[in-house]
Image (spheres, rainbow, N blue to C red):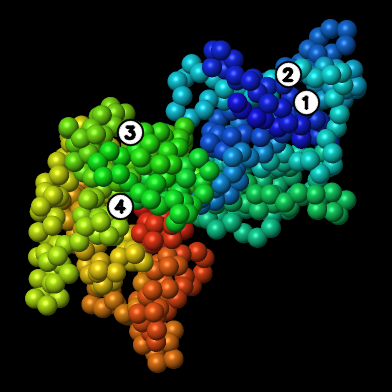
Amino acid sequence: MAVATFGGFCSAASAATNGTEKSVTKMPRLAAPIGGQTAFLVAVNYPLDISGRKVDGRITVRFPGGGKLTRRWSARPHGGDLRPGDRRAAFRFVHSIPLGNAASRRVIRQRRAVRVSSRVSYLRPDTDDSTETRTGSGVSAKGIRFAPGQMCATAPLLLLTAKTGDTARGALPRCGSRAGWSVVGAPGGGIASIQGDLFRYTQKERAAGSDEIDLVGRSRGRVISRQSVQLRVSPVAADTVSVRAMGDSVTAGFGYYGETGGPMPFTSLLHCKPAAVTFNDACSSNSYNRNSGIGTVPDYLPDYGLSRNISWAAQWANQYGITDYKNYAVSGSAPSDWLPGGQFAATTQQIQRENPDYIVMTIGANPILSNVLFGIDDMGCALESDLFGNYRKCVEAAFAKVDLSAKLKALYTQLIENTSSKIVLMQYHLAIPAADIAYTAGQIAMMDELMNDTIAGVASQVSPERINVIAPPHFNVGIDMTPLFPAKFSCSWFDWKVDGPSVQADPSQDLLELAHPLSFCPGPAQGQPWVISGDTGIHPSATGYTQMAGQIPAPE
């Protein structure tokens, strides 16, 4: 059952038998006239997954004695600035539908006697085009009122195609009182100004990604609104770009509940940890499932976790305003699961049929690296290898045992031969889990490096032109990691060098400090840890995924 709020009034929607949902609402309000013209202000509570997508509306005014006025409009409501790990269920957006001079005069003159009906409609993500969700349909009681002075339309979302010097213009928000607007601060990727009742944004050279213009509205010297114009700048039109994600838990965003956007607590790890054989994508940012032992298939969110903005794939798409996005990744899956005969082979074929502009993934760590990190399976030779100096050979033998290179090559080749997509391979981040006491931090880092080398090496064999391998930034451990990583930072009294302020999970940092009490450097320097604690410190947090997404070039 959908719930919508219009003009501050809440109404529940009941589903019709044809799949269309409707709700009865209070009528819109009128903005303060400017130059004799007014506008309808229509406030709506949208489900979070509608953010950035097109909606259509209609307002009909029936005048006493006959005659009517109808305004049809389209807009792109949005939930505001991008929030990694967004936990909201809905967001409020106030639309502004302008009226011309003649219509404004008639509506204002007869506002106490008119009847107004309004409707807002939209398609939920990943639904059949014939299934339309409607919210906000209803007929008012007699009369329409002016909006309260502090009620303002929401500043728009603008999608720009990046070209040096391109300029975007838009109408400033209308309010219940006449407001004067000013730009506060400077946007990061361009120059903003106000000209009359319009704002203007001119891009800087090579600016791309998310940006915003911060606005303050004042009426009679008093601030009545603070908001921002959201900008998504891409080298190509965002509406023309399609993205499909596949692979394992690092792309699925394991450790976050897709339904709420909240992190998984450690007490749920037993139920969330991927099962031994059949994977249902439990406790992942793109899935409803919350127990790996219940159900045998993934239950994806309607927008595949895009609006939750957690996984690196979602955060990259959101930076550029891409909404044609599906994240099919499944926590626990290995390359063989996506090949013919594997449990997700049909999904691979579906992606190939869709032939998106981009296929993005992390794949290859399962089962070897995940088993080691979760403490399920130890490589005995690796534990003893420090004595004999054969650690690299031991890890490579483990990769050979599961035929890693051959399976990666088969999967990459299948995608290259059956799509025209650009393929983005994200390599694995460095995580030092608190629960894994069998291996040293150096051994885990070496294993991670060998995994990433294998991914890059196979990709270069298959198609260096079509496959772009992306290395995540180094996830600082906070100890001396030489020779794998340079030690140039110190926060100890003795000036002992480490790789930098640790971004590992909190429980991992606690153990690292116990093992290195005089040299350990806690962190992060700012913000949250880049690794979650709920799985003992294995998967990236939403903050960590932000760092990873930032390494990927803009779509082209």
Q: Are marks 4 and 3 in contact (CB under 8 Å)?
A: no
Few, some or many C-alpha atoms within 10 Å of disc 4 (few <14, some 14-19, many ≥20)? many
Q: Which residue is mark 2?
A: 138
Instruction: Point out the residue furthest to the bottom here.
Output: 494
Quarter of the figure with the N terminus: top right
The disc, 1 or 4, on the residue closer to the chain's N-terminal end is 1
Helix, strand or loop at label 2? It is: strand
Q: Amino acid at mark 1?
A: Lys
Quarter of the figure with the C terminus: top left
Spatial CA span between label 2 and label 3: 42 Å
The disc, 2 or 3, on the residue closer to the chain's N-terminal end is 2
Q: Residue at x 47, y 70 (%)?
A: 524
In terms of depth relative to the viewer, which is nearer, 302 or 391? 391
Q: Amino acid at mark 3?
A: Thr
Spatial CA span between label 1 and label 3: 44 Å
Q: Amino acid at mark 2?
A: Gly
Residue 554 visible (yes or no): no
Residue 189, how many percent across, how many down? 53, 55
Q: Which residue is mark 3?
A: 296
Q: Which residue is mark 1?
A: 26
Helix, strand or loop at label 3? It is: loop
Q: Which mark is residue 426?
A: 4
User: Quarter of the image holding residue 388?
Assistant: bottom left
The disc, 4 or 3, on the residue closer to the chain's N-terminal end is 3
